[in-house]
Structure formats: C-alpha cells, structure tokens
Amino acid sequence: GFLLTVNDGSLLPLHSSIIKCISAIESHALASKPSLVPAIFSTYLQLCQLVHTWPQGAHQCAVKGMFPEKYILLGERALINISRLYEKTHSFPCLLDSLLLLDIVDAIKTPLVMKYKCIKQTSWKIGVEVLLSILTASIFDIKDKDRLAEVWRKVTKTLDEFLFSSVK
C-alpha cells in the first residue's frame, strides 16, 4: 500500500531524528509506561499538521525540493506512525476513555478534503489508509455508542467531504 512510500531516507536528518526520539519514547511506553501513550499521540497529531501547514518562512527556502516538501514528508511519517501505534494501543484503557479517534479523524480530514490540491498526492492517499486502519482497529472496541456519536458524525462528514469535495 501507500504506507510504504515514505521512508526515513527521504526525511531531513533533523526530521528523522525527531521520529527516532519519539519512537524510543514509544517503545518505553509500550514496554512499561502506557500512561505516556496519549502524549505520544498528541505529538504525532501536531506533526501531522505539517502535511498542509508549514512553519513561517518555509516557502522562502532557496534550496529546490527542501520546503515545504520535506515538512510534508515529516507530516506523512507522523500520520503513518499514528496508524501503526493506534493498531497496537487502541484497546488500552487510557485510550478507550478518551476521544483520540476524534482527534485522529480531525488530523486526516484536511488532506482528505484537499485531495488533488495536496502538494504531494501521497498525503491524501496515506490519509485514506490511516482512516481505514483506525476504523478497522477500533470497530470492535465500541461498547458505548452514544459516547462516540461525535466521532461517527465527524467520520461521516469527513467521508462526505472527501468523496464529494468542493475543492477542485
């Protein structure tokens, strides 16, 4: 699938180091400190915004291919890592009690709605794969349908805007 299109070799060394640091914390959290997992998701969710929003001055870089493309690659890597981590942790009590699913859907909504307007076409394709992955992983964890009503409204709206986009 498209999740294999982004590799660490295409990231800037600083961006690769950021992902490696978060991965080290993630390994520690999964092994012995699951209470860190929500903060890891929060970090990845912030990095996901780089798929469509870049730091000030990113467009002014004179090196062709450096910006905003490299920021987009970091944002895509964060999206992929969210999907992978969610598949491992979706049944953790600290995540079941939160509305993390809503935050993830919010994070992938923009690339899905932008679709063909994304600078890198892999962004919305990765967004689709992440959405399918998180929904597949969490569908059997749903015990209280009323508590997740907002999540399903957001998923429905996101899919509607993705499939019948007003962005041309």
Image: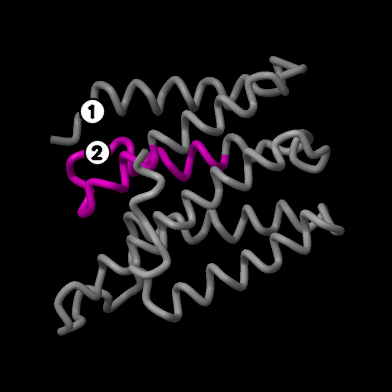
Percent position of residue 93, x then y: 83, 38
Q: Is residue 161 above or below residue 58?
A: above
At 74% from the left and 40% from the top, the residue drawn is 95
The numbered dot on residue 47 is none
The numbered dot on residue 165 is 1
Going by the numbered disc 2, the residue's amino acid type is Lys
Q: Which residue is mark 2?
A: 115
Q: Is residue 106 above or below residue 17?
A: above
At 77% from the left and 17% from the top, the residue drawn is 143
The span shown in magenta is 103-127
Front position in the image: 101 or 141: 141
Instruction: Examine the structure image and report whether residue 111 is included in the region drawn in magenta.
Output: yes
Q: Mark 2–mark 1 contact, CB under 8 Å? A: yes
Percent position of residue 66, x then y: 24, 75
Give the residue furthest to the right: 32
Q: Quadrant of residue 83?
A: top right
Q: Quadrant of the N terminus?
A: top left
Q: Quadrant of residue 149?
A: top right
Q: Secondary structure at mark 2?
A: helix
Q: Secondary structure at mark 1?
A: loop
Using residue 120 as the reference point, say whether residue 132 is left or right of it. Answer: right
